[in-house]
Image (spheres, helix red, strand yellow):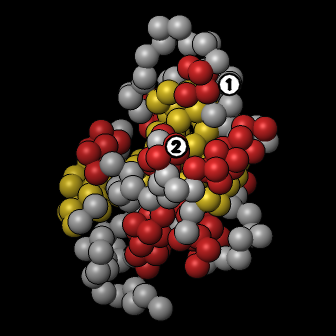
Amino acid sequence: MLKTDELQYHIAAKRGEIGGYCLLPGDPGRCEKIAAYLDGAYHLGSNREYNIWCGRLDGELVTVCSTGIGGPSTAIAVEELCACGAHTFIRIGTCGGIALPVRSGDIVIASGAVRQDGTSREYAPIEFPAVPSSDVLFALISAAKEQGLPYHTGVVQSKDSFYGQHSPARMATEKTLLEKWEAWKRLGVLASEMEASTLFTVASSLGVRAGAVFMCVWNQERYHAGLDGDESECHDTDRAIRTAVSAIRELMRDQKQT
């Protein structure tokens, strides 16, 4: 059991420094950009892959903490942020499209995640679904609608190996990787990323809320189908950031009304 009255080992923060609402990018370099949407933003500290910024939304303390890439470091961040008093998490990330309607620059809001990761299996049996909290999911959808953004809601695939997806032919497990990828396509999985299944499962085990919103960098299936023409990759995460910040505001309003 994590001690809640001590400096947390990996994130190097303690109770009283962390807000109840947390925005979780993977990349430490994105934290300052996200924090710019907060009032009075300041840098709390940085240790390993965990870069932490804080500020206020509607007068309430909000924390931005990077998780690094993948499930293990994401689970550590959520565990230690929870020990510091956090109760609501929204992942702001990027993804690669799988379903053909998902285009570069579109927003993807996860209603569930394929648990093709290892970390979540140490928190729950594989039969347990990796799903976001319904109120966080609905707040993200509402935020995307209000801003008129092109968005999709559905299941995403969470994987452990980036190059297992992008270079499956050179892996000893090529057959299995390609079979599963084809299954995700046939099942209508929207996109591929690396942290949502861990976030959702860990949050469920800890009894806290979580959701995830992504910006689609590129869709390899659209490219292979000859649908994109000259469409280039998109690396601007501003749409996903604005969606998450707006969702946090809505969740805060709802909390104050209960």
Out of 253 and 95, give the one closest to the viewer: 95
For residue 84, what is the image quadrant? bottom left
Which circle, 2 or 1, is nearer the viewer?
2
Residue at image location 56% in from the left, 20% down from the top: 223
**In the rendered view, does 187 fall on the left or right side of 71?**
right
Residue at image location 47% in from the left, 8% down from the top: 230
Q: Secondary structure at mark 2?
A: helix
Residue 196 horizontal/vertical position (percent):
56, 55
Residue 177 horizontal/vertical position (percent):
61, 50
Judge whether residue 155 can be spotted in this image: no
Q: Secondary structure at mark 1?
A: loop
Residue at image location 68% in from the left, 24% down from the top: 100
Residue denoted by label 1: 100
For residue 187, what is the image quadrant? top right
Residue 55 horizontal/vertical position (percent):
32, 52
Residue 238 horizontal/vertical position (percent):
41, 30
* Cβ atoms at labels 2 and 1 below 8 Å apart: no
| Residue 258 tag number | none
Kind of residue indicated by mark 1: Leu
First in residue order: circle 2 vs circle 1:
1
Judge whether residue 200 can be spotted in this image: yes
Kind of residue indicated by mark 2: Ala
Residue denoted by label 2: 169
Q: CA distance from mark 2 to mark 1?
A: 22 Å
Q: Is residue 252 above or below residue 215?
A: below
Residue at image location 77% in from the left, 70% down from the top: 127
**In the rendered view, does 31 fall on the left or right side of 182?**
left
Judge the density around disc 2: few (<14), some (14-19), many (≥20) Cα neighbours within 10 Å. Answer: some
For residue 173, what is the image quadrant? bottom right
Judge the density around disc 1: few (<14), some (14-19), many (≥20) Cα neighbours within 10 Å. Answer: some
Q: Is residue 33 above or below residue 75?
A: above
